[in-house]
Image (cartoon, grey):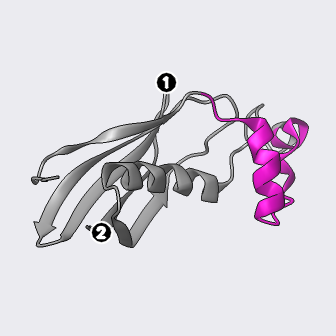
């Protein structure tokens, strides 16, 4: 497959972020923070009225987009900036663009967007293909 600077990467979409998956992530990550498990705690903290997705799950969405865009590739480096929360029920879409190519190494910029709220995480990655 060939790539060019400016290419748009195929989006990766989670139609509805699952509160049930958050419970599983909490176990997997050993993260008992109640904002992922109890909407009443989220409300009491003034953070909204829905469960808040774990940050590593949001990063996994972005990694999934990259791995689908570059089958067989390897993420050499990745950084991202958390800008807002992802909540249970949100429709989340990761998009990306090729920003540079150096031989078998491709640099990309990406964003995790939530319908109705915009970008909640953005970053860059370097993929070796």
Q: CA distance from mark 2 to mark 1?
A: 29 Å
Residue named by callout 2: 126
Relative horizontal placement of residue 18, taking residue 113 as reference (left or right): right
Residue at left offset 90%, top offset 37%: 40
Q: Residue at x 31, y 39 (%)?
A: 10
Q: Is residue 59 magenta?
A: no
What are the residue bounds of the magenta stretch? Answer: 16-42
7 up-or-down from 91: above or below: below
- Between 48 and 54, the one lying in front of the other is 54
Residue 59 versus residue 19 in the image, above or below:
below
Rate crowding at label 1 as few (under 14), some (14 to 19) or many (20 or more) other CA atoms within 10 Å: few
Name the residue at 71% across, 35% down: 18
Q: Is residue 16 above or below residue 111?
A: above
Q: Position of residue 70 (x, y in %)?
A: 31, 55
Q: How many marks?
A: 2
Task: Judge left or right: residue 110 versus residue 38.
Answer: left
| Residue 37 included in the magenta stretch of the image | yes
Kindly identify the residue that appears in the image at 55 percent across and 46 percent down: 84
| Label 2 neighbour load within 10 Å: few <14, some 14-19, many 20+ | many
Q: What secondary structure is found at the residue carrying circle 1? A: loop
> Is the Cβ of the residue at disc 2 closer than 8 Å to that at disc 1?
no
Q: Position of residue 77 (x, y in %)?
A: 37, 74
State which tag comes first along the sequence, 2 or 1.
1
Image quadrant in which you'd find residue 101: bottom left
Residue hosting label 1: 116
Whole-percent x, y for residue 33 in the image: 84, 57
Decide if residue 8 is on the left or right side of residue 31: left
Tag 2, which secondary structure? strand
């Amino acid at each position: 497959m060939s790539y060019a600077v400016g290419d748009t990467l195929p989006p990766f979409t989670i139609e509805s972020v699952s509160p049930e998956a958050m419970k599983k992530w909490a176990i997997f990550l050993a993260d008992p923070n109640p904002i992922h498990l109890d909407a009443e705690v989220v409300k009491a903290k003034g953070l909204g009225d829905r469960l808040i997705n774990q940050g590593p799950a949001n990063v996994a969405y972005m990694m999934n987009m990259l791995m689908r865009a570059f089958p067989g590739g390897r993420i050499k480096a990745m950084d991202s900036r958390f800008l807002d929360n992802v909540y249970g029920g949100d429709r989340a879409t990761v998009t990306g663009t090729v920003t540079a190519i150096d031989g078998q190494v491709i640099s990309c910029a990406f964003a995790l967007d939530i319908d109705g709220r915009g970008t909640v995480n953005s970053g860059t990655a370097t993929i070796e293909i």
